[in-house]
Amino acid sequence: MNELKRVLIVYNPVSGGAGDPSLWLGQVVNRLCKEMPAIVNVIPTSLDMNHQDLLPHFANCDMVVAAGGDGTVRLVLSAMANCPSKAKVGIVPMGTANILARNLELYEENILSDPLDDAISVILNGSEKQIDLGIMNGHYFSVAAGAGPLADATIQAGRFDKANWKLLAYATSMMHKFALPPVVFGITADNDQFQLAASGIFVSNVANVGMGMLSDTAELDDGWLDMCILNPQHFRDYFRLGFHFTVGAFGGEAPYYIRKVKKVHLEVLPIRSPISSFQFLSQRVRNYVSGKSGNLPPRMKEATAMIDGDACGTLPMDIEVVPQAVTILVPPPPEENPAMQPD
């Protein structure tokens, strides 16, 4: 007889794509109890919960399952990165973007696939994979940290829009940032120091950041983060950037710069940023519509820090990679997956 595994499910009762937990949580518990087999406990998240609150519940667990969106996954992974037991982590993606789950290919993105069934199958039959995390000012992230107007777009995509438009909500939010001037950043990337104006800087742990493919070279287990600096100047840059984020490809050279890093320091410099003629025209149109008078771009004094799509204080940001921080359950290789075997 198989030894019973001890499993804890941390679930978000209000995840954007999840619906009423009574419609899906029981299915997850039932299958794990029967097919693993396991003793399963569940804990709902709350708005004021932090990763320290979870640590006492992780004691003696063989596995912790994060059931919810990217915020729930980040909460569980943050706790696990600080937990001496280092239990395996399973993911049931029930949010609107599910960015880490997409990058781990935990479910098939087609109308014939059942994401919930796919996720449970990975928990039951998956392979173990150690992945890196990033840490920004003491806060862990699995997807990306960033700052600037385009990073703000990932924060300000509304819950209603994300629930109805999914990833297109981020592109819509990004379009609202066209007229905003770039921010002048002071950057220390490993041992190099420089300053530049940018509409967005993302320090990414994954290739797909939700708006689309940001870096084709980013890997979850390579011990590096990808610093992506975006500063579109003209309409064609915004068009290509939006097309790239929507479909994951475009012709020509990308309107941004990518560099592998292990440590990054970002700060806002109180310098008036230069703007292109397209940005100037966009500001004039925006001011006309809103009834405001046109002024020179302000000298920026602060910017919001973003991690995994959520606001997390303000700059300066100190970011570092944490190699092989947690162990995640991922789909097994095709030769080990019974569903992939020929009849």
Image (cartoon, helix red, strand yellow):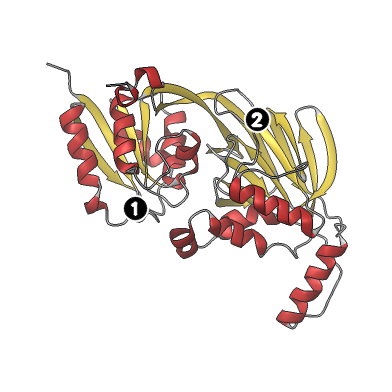
Q: Which residue is mark 1?
A: 18
Looking at the rendered image, the quarter that the N terminus falls into is top left
Residue 311 relative to residue 80: left or right: right
Residue at position x 58%, y 43% in the image: 209
Q: Which mark is residue 217?
A: 2
Single out the mark in the foreground, 1 or 2.
Answer: 2
Image coords of residue 304 (percent x, y): 65, 54
Sooner in the amino-acid sequence: mark 1 or mark 2: 1
Image quadrant assignment for residue 54: top left
Q: Residue 157 appears at what percent x and percent y?
A: 55, 60
Quadrant showing the C terminus: top left
Q: Secondary structure at mark 2?
A: loop
Q: How many marks?
A: 2
Q: Using the image as rendered, state which of residue 33 and residue 112 is in the foreground.
A: 112
Q: Amino acid at mark 2?
A: Thr
Point out residue 236 in the picture as x, y percentages from the top left corner.
Answer: 78, 56
